[in-house]
Amino acid sequence: GLCVSTSFAATAGSAGVSRPLADAILLSDADFYAQFPYRTVADVLPFLRECAREGDPDSVVAALDLWAARYPMYQISATKGAILDGALRRASPNIAVEIGSFIGYSAVRMARALPRTARLVCVEASPDFAEVARSVVAYAGLDATFVVAKASDCVPRLAELAGDDPIDFLFLDHAKEAYLADLQRLEAANLVRNGTVVLADNVRYPGAPGFLDYVVPPRYDTQLVDAPYEAVGWETNWKVVDDAMSISTRLALLSQ
Ligand SMILES: C[S@@+](CC[C@H](N)C(=O)[O-])C[C@H]1O[C@@H](n2cnc3c(N)ncnc32)[C@H](O)[C@@H]1O
């Protein structure tokens, strides 16, 4: 529909689209679905090999934007991706953690926006998704360490990976109802410091009960950034729903 082409056009222009991706953009729905079927998440890999340049994160992001436009699914939009890029660049973290990677779209965006010496750790509960995400990040020529675990079980491994260092930037995009408990688990393990930035998606829709009430002074300073949730009912009737990302900065550590 209209939403798809407009939102994609905005990214394609800035990303330096390769010739094959430009061809794929022009395919009719029927031709696109015939040439690039989506039966399992791993089907994104042959599409990327054809439509994105290996070692070129911009072309991988542009190709995944097209993939998501033809197959609306659970990755953040290009608009939300730009919000993530901006927050990450402003925070300039040494250690960034993402919880909920799906096939690696936001992981590529984060790895691309990080300082060279920084590390990205991605926590993903599904082994299948994590394996695809790992391949996508590698295809983009970027680095990330994957922890295949539920967020509630990832703390020991995160602590090990971080050494004595806290997480400087945390992106929450997994089970919305688990945001609060999983953040508090990281706090209890001293993985959050004064100034740690926590960016959370879907805090308005589907919504993160309890989480938004928690990330307020004196614990956190929080800014809400409006950005629509695009994929509601995409199979039958495309609907844009109000949503927001929250960007919270830790103000003070409480003893737990
Ligand atoms: C919305 S998708 C993430 C999209 C990704 N951040 C992107 O923008 O490309 C949510 C992901 O969280 C994972 N997930 C759900 N609950 C989880 C949990 N408790 N711990 C870790 N991962 C979880 C799901 O398997 C799914 O891949």
Image (spheres, rainbow, N blue to C red):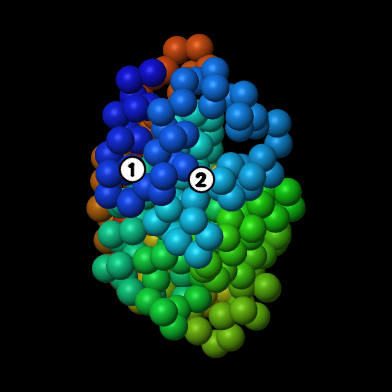
The N terminus appears in which quarter of the rendering? top left
What percent of the width, then of the height, locates residue 136?
Answer: 58, 56
Q: Amino acid at mark 1?
A: Ala
In this rendering, the answer to whether 192 lies above or below 108 is below
Relative side of 139 to 24, left or right: right
Q: Tell me the number on the disc at residue 151.
A: none
Closer to the camera, 140 or 53?
53
Q: Residues within 10 Å of mark 1 (few under 14, many from 20)?
A: many
Query: Would you say 34 lies left or right of 228 here?
Result: right
Q: Is residue 18 left or right of residue 151?
A: left
Q: Position of residue 249 (x, y in %)?
A: 32, 65
Q: Is mark 1 within 8 Å of ligand 1?
A: no
Q: Residue at x 56, y 46 (%)?
A: 50
Residue drawn at 70 percent across, 55 percent down: 131
Q: Which residue is mark 2?
A: 51
Say which quarter of the image contains residue 44: top right
Q: Secondary structure at mark 1?
A: helix
Q: Is mark 2 within 8 Å of ligand 1?
A: no
Do tag 2 and tag 1 residues touch (Cβ < 8 Å)? no
Mark 2 secondary-structure assignment: helix
Which residue was labeled with disc 1? Answer: 12
Residue 94, image quadrant: bottom left
Earlier in the chain: of badge 2 and badge 1, it is 1
Q: Residue at x 65, y 31 (%)?
A: 38
Task: Measure how far apart labels 2 and 1 are at the Cα level.
Answer: 12 Å
Q: Is residue 243 visible?
A: no
Q: Residue furthest right?
A: 127
Q: Position of residue 245 (x, y in %)?
A: 34, 46
* 1 to the left or right of 138: left
